Image (cartoon, coloured by chain):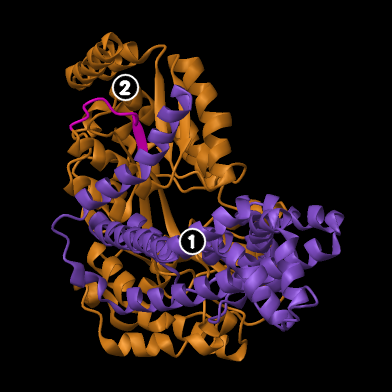
């Protein structure tokens, strides 16, 4: 490894920890019971709902697409599928806002700015499916077809074939995608700000609002939420990787041949 | 090892340089300030969300400053709360030389800045044109005394606008407005109360119920219960509200709702003439209207405070105030007292007062009420959630 890349990685690594250190410093002496407020509780609930639904749907659809395209070898379709990835989130939010807030034929079926946040979820699924697809399709590209052939030879049912010959290799990319998506969606601003409702608001929107309006006394609430949420995601990442470490290592060794 | 030493040396030099800077001083007289400010740049931090306002600064004010005083004006668009925060961080870190020379501020942002001692005082006696100011407008900022920490730049009143092609019998009181929303479901809404304008709209309703008596920030439950009865007939059944005035204006421009609102009685004229707002746009003055003044202030750690004074003086000149009030750019009401101007200037201002979307100035003045203090703004912000739920 060259020296410059080592330095660069150290800087990249140091940034999140500096961020957490600053947040810790800002929240010293913060009365955490202030967060036990109806607005924050409602925000947490709706954030979990939107994040988990969007992430789960993106993972399932993205994986399914990657698998189908890999099996059929229709790579031209793959290049089309990447397109939504290159649309900025703000632009996607506007697009869906225009589509679902009036005038357009689909209007009335589902609408922007309603309590179920369906359009928010739809926007995220549309944006993140290509991401999951890209993460997973590479794995399929490297997949040793021998495993699948063997599963077929053993006359396993299709679901069983998937479970033994594909799933173990998918754990790693899916876990990576899961945390990237959860971290991103749960604290994002533009999409829920434009397509969400006034109450309850997603964490990112409510935190930004408390941070920027009125007395800056409320800023500490936002720092505290950002800190708690970051630590929650950190520990989730660490725990999930630790739990799957043994399995993943075994599989990686196997797949490298 | 040697490289590490060099690095350490550089770092300590940077620290020394940072500690060594001292605060820039304001000169005793305006003439000296103008001399000092020559060939300097003034960083003017201001909310940048309105095209007309931005063009007024860039196309009208900046060239005049360059010509008259040889001062470069650099407009920096930023949300007000954002740069007040930045200043308070400067204060905490003892940064004596900041990046902001002049800022546009009012309301609770001013109160916060004043409480945290982020502003330079005694501005008025150093600015010649401050003698022309409307003293009532200059005295308080949304209930907080200004104490020479800021200088009135403009003075506007809260006005609603409606589309006369769709609204045949416009309401004349807030009660009638409530009834109107029931007869025309989905055609009215107001911005969230975190927004400056949305909060002001709720203050008007509060005033309609309780008058000046509600000024202590204790809002009775009955008020919230009544406000909640508005929700079912608002846009989207009140399940969501526009996040900002800009979003409400968009809904109005698209014809989704039939009324919009805002501080500044002349704000709709340019929009209507440009075809953004419907041609039938007219002003609606209900039984009272909050008057609001907005101000200019100089931060405690301005790098170029003398340049800032020069800019303020120029912004308060009758010519600049007249151009500001003209619908071409902004249409913002003057903060000057017209009786203090000479006859020609006064006539020029009075001549401006005809636009299709302007309210009758006398009626508007008659119904003007002072704003509640910050306590009410905060109380509304904290308690309104129950209506939005």
Q: B244 or B315, which lies in front?
A: B244
Q: Is residue B32 magenta?
A: no
Q: Secondary structure at mark 1?
A: helix
Report the magenta residues as a range: B94-103
Q: Position of residue B364 (x, y in %)?
A: 45, 64
Tell me the number on the disc at residue A179: 1
Above or below, comparing residue B308 to residue A159 in the picture:
above
Q: Residue at x 35, y 15 (%)?
A: B37
Q: Position of residue B334 (x, y in %)?
A: 43, 44
Category of crowding for the residue at label 2, using alpha-carbon neighbours closer than 10 angstroms: few (below 14), some (14–19), many (at least 20): many
Chain A image colour = purple
The residues bearing labels 2 and 1 have C-alpha atoms spaced at a distance of: 48 Å
Instruction: Look at the image and give the colour of chain B.
Output: orange
**Main structural element of the magenta stretch: helix, strand or loop?**
loop
- Residue A86: image x %, image y %? 69, 50
For label 2, the SS is: loop
Q: Which residue is mark 2?
A: B304
Q: Residue at x 39, y 40 (%)?
A: A13
Q: Is residue B98 magenta?
A: yes
Q: Is residue B338 visible?
A: yes
Chain under label 1? A
In the displayed structure image, the side of residue B277 where residue B91 appears, left or right = left
- The answer to whether any part of residue B255 appears in the image is no
Q: Is residue B152 left or right of residue A66?
A: left
């Amino acid at each position: 490894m060259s020296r410059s890349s080592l330095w660069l990685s150290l800087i990249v690594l140091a940034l999140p920890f500096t961020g957490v250190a600053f947040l810790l410093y800002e929240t010293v002496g913060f009365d955490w019971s202030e967060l036990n407020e109806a607005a924050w509780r409602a925000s947490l609930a709706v954030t979990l709902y939107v994040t988990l639904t969007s992430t789960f749907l993106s993972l399932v659809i993205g994986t399914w697409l990657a698998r189908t395209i890999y099996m059929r070898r229709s790579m031209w379709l793959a290049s089309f599928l990447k397109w939504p990835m290159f649309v900025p989130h703000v632009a996607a939010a506007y697009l869906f806002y225009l589509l679902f807030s009036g005038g357009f034929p689909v209007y009335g079926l589902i609408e922007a700015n309603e309590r179920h946040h369906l359009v928010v979820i739809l926007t995220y699924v549309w944006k993140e499916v290509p991401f999951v697809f890209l993460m997973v399709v590479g794995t399929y590209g490297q997949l040793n077809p021998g495993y699948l052939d063997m599963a077929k030879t053993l006359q396993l049912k299709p679901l069983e074939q998937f479970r033994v010959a594909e799933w173990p290799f998918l754990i790693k990319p899916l876990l990576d995608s899961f945390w990237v998506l959860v971290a991103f969606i749960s604290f994002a601003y533009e999409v829920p700000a434009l397509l969400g409702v006034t109450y309850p608001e997603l964490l990112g929107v409510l935190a930004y609002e408390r941070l920027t309006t009125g007395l800056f006394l409320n800023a500490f609430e936002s720092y505290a939420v950002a800190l708690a949420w970051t630590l929650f995601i950190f520990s989730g990442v660490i725990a999930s990787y630790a739990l799957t470490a043994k399995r993943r290592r075994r599989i990686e060794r196997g797949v490298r041949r | 090892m040697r490289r590490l030493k060099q690095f350490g040396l550089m770092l300590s030099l940077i620290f020394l340089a940072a500690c060594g800077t001292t605060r820039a001083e304001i000169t005793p007289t305006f003439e000296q300030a103008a001399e000092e400010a020559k060939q300097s740049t003034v960083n003017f931090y201001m909310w940048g969300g309105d095209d007309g306002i931005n063009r007024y600064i860039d196309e009208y004010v900046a060239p005049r400053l360059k010509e008259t005083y040889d001062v470069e004006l650099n407009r920096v668009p930023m949300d007000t709360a954002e740069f007040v925060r930045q200043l308070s961080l400067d204060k905490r870190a003892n940064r004596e030389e900041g990046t902001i020379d002049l800022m546009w501020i009012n309301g609770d942002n001013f109160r916060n800045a004043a409480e945290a001692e982020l502003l330079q005082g005694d501005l008025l006696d150093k600015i010649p044109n401050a003698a022309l100011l409307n003293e009532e407008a200059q005295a308080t900022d949304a209930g907080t005394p200004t104490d020479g920490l800021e200088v009135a730049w403009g003075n506007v009143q809260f006005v609603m606008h409606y589309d006369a092609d769709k609204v045949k019998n416009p309401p004349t009181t807030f009660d009638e407005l409530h009834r109107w929303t029931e007869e025309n479901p989905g055609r009215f809404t107001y911005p969230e109360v975190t927004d400056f304008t949305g909060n002001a709209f709720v203050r008007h309703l509060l005033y309609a119920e309780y008058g000046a008596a509600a000024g202590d920030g204790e809002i009775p439950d009955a008020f919230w219960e009544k406000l909640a009865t508005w929700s079912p007939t608002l846009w989207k059944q009140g399940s969501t509200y526009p996040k900002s005035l800009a979003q409400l204006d968009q809904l109005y421009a698209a014809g989704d709702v039939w009324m919009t609102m805002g501080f500044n009685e002349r704000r709709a004229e340019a929009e209507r003439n440009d075809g953004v707002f419907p041609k039938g746009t007219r002003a609606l003055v209900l039984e009272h209207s909050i008057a609001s003044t907005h101000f200019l202030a100089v931060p405690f750690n301005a790098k170029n405070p003398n340049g800032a004074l020069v800019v303020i003086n120029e912004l308060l000149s009758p010519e600049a105030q007249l151009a500001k009030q003209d619908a071409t750019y902004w249409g913002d009401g003057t903060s000057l007292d017209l009786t203090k101007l000479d006859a020609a200037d006064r006539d020029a201002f009075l001549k401006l007062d005809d636009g299709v979307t302007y309210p009758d100035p006398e009626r508007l003045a008659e119904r003007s009420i002072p704003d509640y203090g910050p306590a009410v703004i905060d109380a509304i912000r904290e308690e309104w959630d129950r209506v939005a739920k």
